[in-house]
Image (cartoon, grey):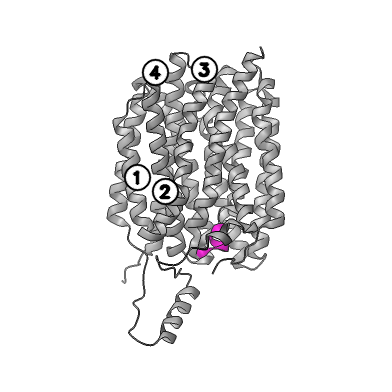
Amino acid sequence: MARMKFPRRYVIVLLTFICTNVCYVERVGFSIAYTVAADAINVNQANKGMILSMFYYGYVLSQIPGGWAAQRLGGRRVLLLSFVLWSLICGLVPLDPSRVVILVLSRLFVGVAQGFIFPAIHTVLAQWVPPQERSRSVSLTTSGMYLGAAGGMLFFPSLVKHMGPQSVFFVEAVLGVAWSVIWLKFSSEPPRIDLPKVSMPKVASREKIKAQAGGVVAPRTVKIPWRRIIFSLPVWAIVVNNFTFHYALYVIMNWLPTYFELALKLSLQDMGSSKMLPYFNMFIFSNIGGVVADHLITKRILSVTKTRKVLNTIGFVVAAVALMALPSFGTPSGTVICSSVALGFLALGRAGFAVNHMDVAPKFAGIVMGVSNTAGTLAGIVGVGLTGNILEAAKDSNMDLTSSDTWKTVFFVPGYLCIFSSVIFLIFSTGEKVFE
């Protein structure tokens, strides 16, 4: 009996899924471990916000360079180098809130290293995955973020309780090194068709055949249309929605533990498995969005443009309602339900804006992702830091941080942003190729 061959592109997609999983284990792990360590020495909310946002300062610096590096050096190499760098930092740096300079620099460099990862992933997937599989491939890959966040929320509070905050850094370093070894062993450069030594019409024919097969013919020396990318309205529609998505995600990821402890009087250790539900919901809805999008496109039920707009709008509008309803409940169960709905439908919306990089610029997906993710990272800087200042200002005004009403501004801001962004995407986005 002939052996069934497992397509190499499936291996690549699976490895990038694990990659994003480990990255978000690191991010959630730090926020949990640092919050416990900082609370132990009474670090104020503004300073906590500053340390938690330092990752995003580093992250924003390397988004566009990450896209450029992946275009020039290859996504495979860039992914490996970035993983090795942040893993070493996690393994070597002490988690001591009183050593502010060391923490600031370490989070800055971890952010720089991880900033190369998502542009590199989009470059790899654009080269490996044919158009009819892109929605579910990107959705599966990015859903690793949410499964990693769910696993971190479930596992790390108990680890911190029994082994201390520093143990989180050790686990993260081990996971990072392990993935690097697996990637080095099982990944490979994208398939190439050897150019025959014949006339130029043959070369053109070869490029046409490969393009029809879903491959991306983009020589690493190709001129990048920076001006057209920067002034493209469809790109800006992606950028705005990426900003909003990450504003909401990072605020919930970094500040929801504090909301539970201050407003609801409930520690993460006491919540059991319910604390992972918002992120597990993201994992489920992200993959549902990818499968639905590919079905609508391949069965020609909707065009690519309409598919992206419908899923993006549904995701962001429902998320907006859930975010603004969250502080009204004032109970642990209500908070878990609202945050689960909000993050789940935001993940569904990724089948709209997040895959759109490959629709509008398949040859430059890493570059466009770098531009888009720069905005997403700025959302982390703005959202995480601003939330800390909002809470500190409320405290200075003698407002009660233990009251859920005090937190309304924290959750209303991303709610309004979701509505605004969905309108922008409806008006300006397209599923057609913009950049050849």
Which callout, 1 or 4, points to the residue nearer the camera?
Answer: 4
Residue segment shown in magenta: 357-362
Q: Residues within 10 Å of mark 1 (few under 14, many from 20)?
A: many
SS at circle 3? loop
Q: How many marks?
A: 4
Q: Residue at x 67, y 30 (%)?
A: 326
Sequence order check, earlier mark of 3 and 1: 3
Q: Quadrant of residue 250?
A: top right
- Residue topped by disc 1: 83
Q: Is residue 141 left or right of residue 96?
A: right
Q: In which quadrant of the rendered image does the C terminus lie?
A: bottom right
Q: Please, what is the three-letter code of the amino acid marked with disc 1?
A: Phe
Residue extending farthest top: 398
- For the residues labelled 2 and 1, the Cα–Cα distance comes to 8 Å
Sequence order check, earlier mark of 2 and 3: 3
> Mark 3 and mark 4 in contact (Cβ < 8 Å)?
no
Q: Please, what is the three-letter code of the amino acid marked with disc 2?
A: Ile
Q: Is residue 383 above or below residue 210?
A: above
> Can you tell which mark lies on residue 98?
4
- For the residues labelled 4 and 2, the Cα–Cα distance comes to 30 Å
SS at circle 2? helix
Q: Residue at x 63, y 14 (%)?
A: 396
Question: Does 358 appear in magenta?
Answer: yes
Sequence order check, earlier mark of 2 and 1: 1
> Can you tell which mark lies on residue 44?
3
Sequence order check, earlier mark of 4 and 3: 3
- Residue topped by disc 2: 117
- For the residues labelled 3 and 1, the Cα–Cα distance comes to 32 Å
Where residue 72 appears, x then y in whole percent? 38, 60
